[in-house]
Amino acid sequence: MALRSANGFFRTSSPLSISRSNAQAVARLSFRALVRSPERAESLRKLGVKLIEGNFADWNSWKHASDGVAAVFNIIVTHRDAVRWNNVFLDCAKQSGVRHVVQLSGMSVSPKSPAEFHRQMSQCDEALTASGLSHTILRPNVFYQNMLRFAGSIQERVAFGQQPAMPASA
């Protein structure tokens, strides 16, 4: 299985977490990750992931990373060239014989979204669907680790977000 991310690192508690019952099956799998910086992907290497250094815009990088790969977990990156990079990946995946792509998208992606990244994710989802590759598109609502940015506010105000804390009753 190949993993893809912009900077080549994944929180080891997220995509690679497995249950004890699946541990034996996962142990038989081999993982690769196309990364721009192997140094920044050290946490993956320590988990046994083979790091493939390359450039997301380069077809040959994708070819090297995807040859012999049955499935890819594809994370759309936050970058102005994300759609172009994704199209290079899809072309290479088809030519390399990738059998299934699991793509991480978002719940509110839409070609009409006011958020550029959501429009890009929508284009990438549409391209994957049109590619003819067997695929699964995951559209999560929220990742709880992203809520950590509110920890200070919650602790300080005993409230979520920017609203002020309720005054104590007299």
Image (tube, rainbow, N blue to C red):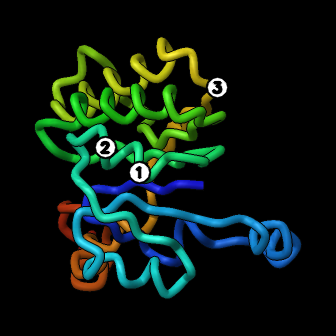
Q: Do the residues labelled 2 and 1 touch (CB within 8 Å)?
A: yes
Estimate how packed mark 2 is, as few (under 14), some (14 to 19) or many (20 or more) residues with alpha carbons within 10 Å: some
x, y percentage for residue 151? 30, 78
Question: Is residue 43 left or right of 151 when viewed as pictured?
Answer: right
Q: Which residue in the structure is indicated by mark 2?
A: 60
Frontmost of labels 3 and 2 is 2
**N-term mark: 1 or 3:** 1
Residue 166 visible, this angle: yes
Q: Which residue in the structure is indicated by mark 3?
A: 134
Which amino acid type is shown beneath numbered disc 3? Ser
Instruction: Look at 21% across and 36% down and name the residue there.
Output: 117
x, y percentage for residue 139? 50, 37
Instruction: Look at 11% across and 37% down and name the residue there.
Output: 80
* SS at circle 2: helix
Estimate how packed mark 1 is, as few (under 14), some (14 to 19) or many (20 or more) residues with alpha carbons within 10 Å: some
x, y percentage for residue 127? 40, 19
Q: Which of 68 and 141 is in front in this view?
A: 68
Alpha carbon distance from label 2 to label 1? 6 Å
Q: Which residue in the structure is indicated by mark 1?
A: 64
Alpha carbon distance from label 1 to label 3? 21 Å
State which quadrant residue 70 falls in.
top right
